[in-house]
Amino acid sequence: MKKRVAVVGVGRMGANMARRLKETGHPVVAVHDVQAQAAGELAAELGCAAPANLSEVTAMADVILTVVTNDAAMRSIFLTGAGSLLDGAAGRIFINCATLSPEIHREVSAAAAAAGARTLEASMASSISHARNGQLYLMVAGDRSAFDDCQALLKDLSLSMRFIEGGPGRAAEVKALVNMVMNINTAGLAEGLGLAAALGHDLTMIREVFSQTGANSRVLETDGADMVAREHDCWFSAEHAAKDSGIALDLAKAKGLQLPLNEATQAQFARMTREGLGGLDKSGIAELTFPGRHAHP
Protein backbone atom coordinates (compact mmCIF):
# COMPACT_ATOMS: atom_id res chain seq x y z
CA MET A 1 0.00 0.00 0.00
CA LYS A 2 1.20 3.50 -0.82
CA LYS A 3 1.89 5.77 2.11
CA ARG A 4 -0.55 8.51 3.02
CA VAL A 5 0.97 11.85 2.04
CA ALA A 6 0.53 15.41 3.28
CA VAL A 7 2.13 18.58 1.93
CA VAL A 8 2.91 21.59 4.11
CA GLY A 9 3.62 24.76 2.15
CA VAL A 10 1.50 24.80 -1.00
CA GLY A 11 2.84 27.70 -2.98
CA ARG A 12 3.58 27.08 -6.62
CA MET A 13 6.13 24.31 -6.03
CA GLY A 14 4.36 22.56 -3.16
CA ALA A 15 0.94 22.68 -4.82
CA ASN A 16 2.26 21.19 -8.05
CA MET A 17 4.09 18.45 -6.15
CA ALA A 18 0.81 17.60 -4.42
CA ARG A 19 -0.99 17.49 -7.78
CA ARG A 20 1.68 15.25 -9.24
CA LEU A 21 1.52 12.82 -6.33
CA LYS A 22 -2.27 12.70 -6.51
CA GLU A 23 -2.31 11.91 -10.23
CA THR A 24 0.35 9.20 -9.85
CA GLY A 25 -1.80 7.36 -7.34
CA HIS A 26 -0.39 8.46 -4.00
CA PRO A 27 -3.10 9.10 -1.41
CA VAL A 28 -2.72 12.81 -0.69
CA VAL A 29 -4.72 13.17 2.51
CA ALA A 30 -3.93 16.71 3.68
CA VAL A 31 -2.42 20.04 2.67
CA HIS A 32 -1.55 22.98 4.89
CA ASP A 33 -0.28 26.51 4.38
CA VAL A 34 -0.07 29.73 6.36
CA GLN A 35 -2.32 31.07 3.60
CA ALA A 36 -5.38 29.10 4.65
CA GLN A 37 -7.38 30.09 1.57
CA ALA A 38 -4.75 28.67 -0.78
CA ALA A 39 -4.65 25.43 1.19
CA GLY A 40 -8.44 25.20 1.18
CA GLU A 41 -8.68 25.74 -2.56
CA LEU A 42 -6.04 23.08 -3.27
CA ALA A 43 -7.71 20.68 -0.83
CA ALA A 44 -11.00 21.09 -2.69
CA GLU A 45 -9.23 20.43 -5.98
CA LEU A 46 -7.51 17.29 -4.68
CA GLY A 47 -10.36 16.02 -2.54
CA CYS A 48 -8.38 16.05 0.69
CA ALA A 49 -8.39 17.80 4.06
CA ALA A 50 -6.84 21.17 4.92
CA PRO A 51 -6.31 20.97 8.68
CA ALA A 52 -5.77 24.24 10.51
CA ASN A 53 -3.33 22.68 12.96
CA LEU A 54 0.03 21.16 12.07
CA SER A 55 -0.34 18.30 14.54
CA GLU A 56 -3.53 17.28 12.71
CA VAL A 57 -1.55 17.08 9.49
CA THR A 58 0.94 14.74 11.13
CA ALA A 59 -1.84 12.60 12.57
CA MET A 60 -3.36 12.05 9.13
CA ALA A 61 -0.25 11.13 7.13
CA ASP A 62 2.64 8.67 6.98
CA VAL A 63 4.89 10.99 4.93
CA ILE A 64 4.83 14.77 5.21
CA LEU A 65 6.54 16.91 2.56
CA THR A 66 7.43 20.47 3.52
CA VAL A 67 8.14 23.29 1.07
CA VAL A 68 8.57 26.48 3.10
CA THR A 69 10.24 29.79 2.39
CA ASN A 70 13.13 30.09 4.83
CA ASP A 71 14.74 28.88 8.05
CA ALA A 72 12.34 30.86 10.24
CA ALA A 73 9.36 29.20 8.57
CA MET A 74 11.00 25.80 9.06
CA ARG A 75 11.45 26.47 12.77
CA SER A 76 7.85 27.61 13.06
CA ILE A 77 6.45 24.32 11.77
CA PHE A 78 8.86 21.93 13.50
CA LEU A 79 10.44 23.49 16.58
CA THR A 80 7.64 25.22 18.47
CA GLY A 81 6.68 22.36 20.78
CA ALA A 82 3.06 21.28 21.22
CA GLY A 83 1.05 21.69 18.04
CA SER A 84 4.02 21.48 15.71
CA LEU A 85 4.53 18.83 13.05
CA LEU A 86 6.58 16.83 15.57
CA ASP A 87 3.67 16.57 17.98
CA GLY A 88 2.72 12.87 17.78
CA ALA A 89 5.24 12.28 15.00
CA ALA A 90 6.53 8.84 16.01
CA GLY A 91 6.85 6.62 12.95
CA ARG A 92 6.41 9.46 10.47
CA ILE A 93 8.80 10.47 7.67
CA PHE A 94 9.37 14.13 6.87
CA ILE A 95 10.75 15.09 3.45
CA ASN A 96 11.90 18.70 3.54
CA CYS A 97 12.24 20.14 0.06
CA ALA A 98 12.92 23.86 0.37
CA THR A 99 16.31 25.49 -0.13
CA LEU A 100 17.35 26.26 3.45
CA SER A 101 20.52 26.39 5.49
CA PRO A 102 22.22 23.07 6.25
CA GLU A 103 22.03 23.94 9.95
CA ILE A 104 18.23 24.09 10.07
CA HIS A 105 18.07 20.67 8.42
CA ARG A 106 20.35 19.32 11.13
CA GLU A 107 18.26 20.93 13.88
CA VAL A 108 15.03 19.50 12.50
CA SER A 109 16.58 16.07 11.96
CA ALA A 110 17.74 15.89 15.58
CA ALA A 111 14.37 17.04 16.90
CA ALA A 112 12.53 14.57 14.68
CA ALA A 113 14.74 11.70 15.82
CA ALA A 114 13.95 12.61 19.43
CA ALA A 115 10.25 12.43 18.54
CA GLY A 116 10.66 9.00 16.92
CA ALA A 117 10.44 10.29 13.33
CA ARG A 118 12.82 10.18 10.36
CA THR A 119 13.78 12.99 8.00
CA LEU A 120 15.11 13.52 4.53
CA GLU A 121 16.08 16.70 2.80
CA ALA A 122 15.18 16.55 -0.87
CA SER A 123 16.60 19.73 -2.35
CA MET A 124 15.16 20.58 -5.75
CA ALA A 125 17.12 21.97 -8.70
CA SER A 126 14.16 22.48 -10.99
CA SER A 127 11.23 24.79 -11.71
CA ILE A 128 7.47 24.87 -11.24
CA SER A 129 6.73 22.99 -14.48
CA HIS A 130 9.17 20.24 -13.47
CA ALA A 131 7.32 19.86 -10.16
CA ARG A 132 4.02 19.52 -11.97
CA ASN A 133 5.32 16.95 -14.45
CA GLY A 134 7.44 14.80 -12.14
CA GLN A 135 10.71 15.99 -13.67
CA LEU A 136 12.49 17.36 -10.63
CA TYR A 137 16.19 16.80 -10.05
CA LEU A 138 16.49 15.90 -6.36
CA MET A 139 19.54 16.07 -4.14
CA VAL A 140 18.66 13.89 -1.17
CA ALA A 141 20.37 13.41 2.18
CA GLY A 142 19.48 12.30 5.67
CA ASP A 143 18.11 8.98 6.89
CA ARG A 144 19.03 6.30 4.37
CA SER A 145 16.25 3.96 5.53
CA ALA A 146 13.70 6.73 4.95
CA PHE A 147 15.15 7.24 1.48
CA ASP A 148 14.73 3.53 0.75
CA ASP A 149 11.17 3.53 2.12
CA CYS A 150 10.13 6.53 -0.01
CA GLN A 151 11.54 5.41 -3.34
CA ALA A 152 8.18 5.15 -5.09
CA LEU A 153 7.14 8.64 -4.03
CA LEU A 154 10.48 10.25 -4.88
CA LYS A 155 10.63 8.55 -8.28
CA ASP A 156 7.17 9.86 -9.16
CA LEU A 157 8.33 13.39 -8.38
CA SER A 158 11.67 13.26 -10.16
CA LEU A 159 13.37 12.65 -13.45
CA SER A 160 16.60 11.95 -11.61
CA MET A 161 17.91 12.04 -8.06
CA ARG A 162 21.16 11.69 -6.18
CA PHE A 163 21.59 10.51 -2.58
CA ILE A 164 24.39 12.43 -0.91
CA GLU A 165 26.19 10.68 1.91
CA GLY A 166 27.21 12.35 5.13
CA GLY A 167 23.97 12.85 6.99
CA PRO A 168 21.57 15.78 7.43
CA GLY A 169 22.53 19.06 5.84
CA ARG A 170 24.76 17.64 3.13
CA ALA A 171 22.20 17.93 0.32
CA ALA A 172 21.46 21.48 1.43
CA GLU A 173 25.17 22.27 1.09
CA VAL A 174 25.22 20.90 -2.45
CA LYS A 175 22.05 22.85 -3.34
CA ALA A 176 23.67 26.03 -2.02
CA LEU A 177 26.61 25.39 -4.34
CA VAL A 178 24.30 24.79 -7.30
CA ASN A 179 22.37 28.00 -6.75
CA MET A 180 25.49 30.01 -6.00
CA VAL A 181 27.04 29.09 -9.37
CA MET A 182 23.73 29.50 -11.21
CA ASN A 183 23.21 32.96 -9.74
CA ILE A 184 26.77 34.03 -10.60
CA ASN A 185 26.21 32.83 -14.18
CA THR A 186 22.92 34.75 -14.33
CA ALA A 187 24.52 37.98 -13.11
CA GLY A 188 27.43 37.57 -15.53
CA LEU A 189 25.13 36.99 -18.49
CA ALA A 190 23.09 40.09 -17.60
CA GLU A 191 26.26 42.18 -17.53
CA GLY A 192 27.50 40.78 -20.84
CA LEU A 193 24.20 41.41 -22.60
CA GLY A 194 23.83 44.81 -20.96
CA LEU A 195 27.24 45.91 -22.19
CA ALA A 196 26.50 44.51 -25.66
CA ALA A 197 23.30 46.57 -25.74
CA ALA A 198 25.18 49.70 -24.68
CA LEU A 199 27.69 49.10 -27.50
CA GLY A 200 24.84 48.85 -30.00
CA HIS A 201 25.24 45.18 -30.93
CA ASP A 202 22.41 43.02 -32.21
CA LEU A 203 21.55 40.93 -29.16
CA THR A 204 20.27 37.97 -31.15
CA MET A 205 23.67 37.78 -32.79
CA ILE A 206 25.43 38.17 -29.44
CA ARG A 207 23.45 35.33 -27.91
CA GLU A 208 24.24 33.09 -30.88
CA VAL A 209 27.96 33.89 -30.55
CA PHE A 210 27.83 33.26 -26.81
CA SER A 211 26.21 29.87 -27.46
CA GLN A 212 29.13 28.77 -29.67
CA THR A 213 31.93 29.94 -27.39
CA GLY A 214 33.16 29.82 -23.82
CA ALA A 215 30.41 32.29 -22.90
CA ASN A 216 27.84 29.52 -23.28
CA SER A 217 25.87 28.35 -20.25
CA ARG A 218 22.58 26.76 -19.23
CA VAL A 219 21.50 30.20 -18.07
CA LEU A 220 22.03 31.58 -21.59
CA GLU A 221 19.53 28.98 -22.79
CA THR A 222 16.94 29.60 -20.09
CA ASP A 223 17.27 33.33 -19.39
CA GLY A 224 19.04 35.03 -22.29
CA ALA A 225 16.00 35.77 -24.46
CA ASP A 226 13.98 36.82 -21.41
CA MET A 227 16.65 39.32 -20.41
CA VAL A 228 16.51 40.92 -23.85
CA ALA A 229 12.70 40.92 -24.07
CA ARG A 230 12.24 42.00 -20.42
CA GLU A 231 10.02 38.98 -19.81
CA HIS A 232 10.58 38.20 -16.15
CA ASP A 233 7.61 36.02 -15.22
CA CYS A 234 8.75 34.34 -12.05
CA TRP A 235 10.10 30.79 -12.09
CA PHE A 236 12.84 31.43 -9.54
CA SER A 237 12.60 34.80 -7.86
CA ALA A 238 15.35 37.35 -7.35
CA GLU A 239 14.40 37.38 -3.66
CA HIS A 240 15.08 33.65 -3.42
CA ALA A 241 18.31 34.07 -5.38
CA ALA A 242 19.48 36.60 -2.79
CA LYS A 243 18.60 34.19 0.03
CA ASP A 244 20.34 31.23 -1.58
CA SER A 245 23.51 33.11 -2.47
CA GLY A 246 23.48 34.29 1.14
CA ILE A 247 23.40 30.70 2.38
CA ALA A 248 26.55 30.01 0.34
CA LEU A 249 28.19 33.13 1.77
CA ASP A 250 27.49 31.94 5.31
CA LEU A 251 28.98 28.53 4.53
CA ALA A 252 32.09 30.16 3.08
CA LYS A 253 32.54 32.44 6.10
CA ALA A 254 32.31 29.44 8.42
CA LYS A 255 35.21 27.88 6.49
CA GLY A 256 37.25 31.07 6.34
CA LEU A 257 36.84 31.45 2.57
CA GLN A 258 36.27 34.60 0.56
CA LEU A 259 33.94 34.35 -2.44
CA PRO A 260 34.04 37.80 -4.07
CA LEU A 261 31.98 36.82 -7.11
CA ASN A 262 29.25 35.37 -4.93
CA GLU A 263 29.36 38.43 -2.68
CA ALA A 264 28.84 40.73 -5.65
CA THR A 265 26.05 38.54 -7.04
CA GLN A 266 24.25 38.36 -3.70
CA ALA A 267 24.48 42.13 -3.40
CA GLN A 268 22.85 42.57 -6.82
CA PHE A 269 19.92 40.28 -6.01
CA ALA A 270 19.57 41.87 -2.56
CA ARG A 271 19.44 45.27 -4.28
CA MET A 272 16.62 44.03 -6.50
CA THR A 273 14.68 43.03 -3.40
CA ARG A 274 15.27 46.39 -1.71
CA GLU A 275 14.16 48.27 -4.84
CA GLY A 276 10.93 46.35 -5.30
CA LEU A 277 12.10 43.91 -7.95
CA GLY A 278 12.44 40.85 -5.73
CA GLY A 279 9.34 39.19 -7.13
CA LEU A 280 10.75 39.14 -10.65
CA ASP A 281 12.42 36.04 -12.00
CA LYS A 282 16.19 35.94 -11.55
CA SER A 283 16.46 37.01 -15.20
CA GLY A 284 15.25 40.38 -13.94
CA ILE A 285 18.77 41.13 -12.78
CA ALA A 286 19.18 42.44 -16.33
CA GLU A 287 17.07 45.41 -15.23
CA LEU A 288 20.13 46.54 -13.26
CA THR A 289 22.57 46.25 -16.17
CA PHE A 290 20.85 47.20 -19.45
CA PRO A 291 20.93 50.86 -20.50
CA GLY A 292 17.60 52.63 -20.25
CA ARG A 293 16.18 50.31 -17.62
CA HIS A 294 15.57 50.42 -13.86
CA ALA A 295 19.06 51.47 -12.81
CA HIS A 296 19.80 53.54 -15.92
CA PRO A 297 16.96 56.00 -16.59
Image (cartoon, grey):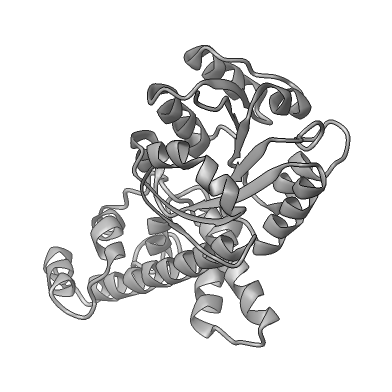
> Is residue 164 depicted above or below 116 in this figure?
below
Numbered marks: total: 0
Q: Nearer the viewer, residue 7 or 12?
A: 7
Q: Residue at x 41, y 39 (%)?
A: 157
- In which image quadrant can residue 215 be found? bottom left
Q: Is the C terminus in the top left, top right, bottom left or bottom right quadrant? A: bottom left
Q: Please state which of residues 42 and 105 is positioned toward the viewer in this rendering.
A: 105
- What residue do we see at 49% from left, 81% from top? 261
Where residue 194 appears, x then y in whole percent?
31, 70
Please tell me whether residue 296 is drawn above or below residue 65 in the rendered image: below
Residue 77 appears in the rendering: yes
Residue 57 lies left or right of residue 289; in this view the side is right
Depth order, front residue of 248/231:
248
Look at 64% across and 39% down and name the residue there. 93
Residue 242 in the image, given as x and y percentages of width and height = 56, 62
Q: Position of residue 147 (x, y in %)?
A: 53, 48
Residue 8 in sight: no
Residue 79: % across, % down = 81, 45
In the rendered image, which quarter is residue 156 located in?
Answer: top left
* Side (left or right) of 193 relative to 187: left
Asked whether, in this view, residue 159 is left or right of residue 285, the answer is left
Q: Image point 78% across, 38% down: which residue?
A: 86
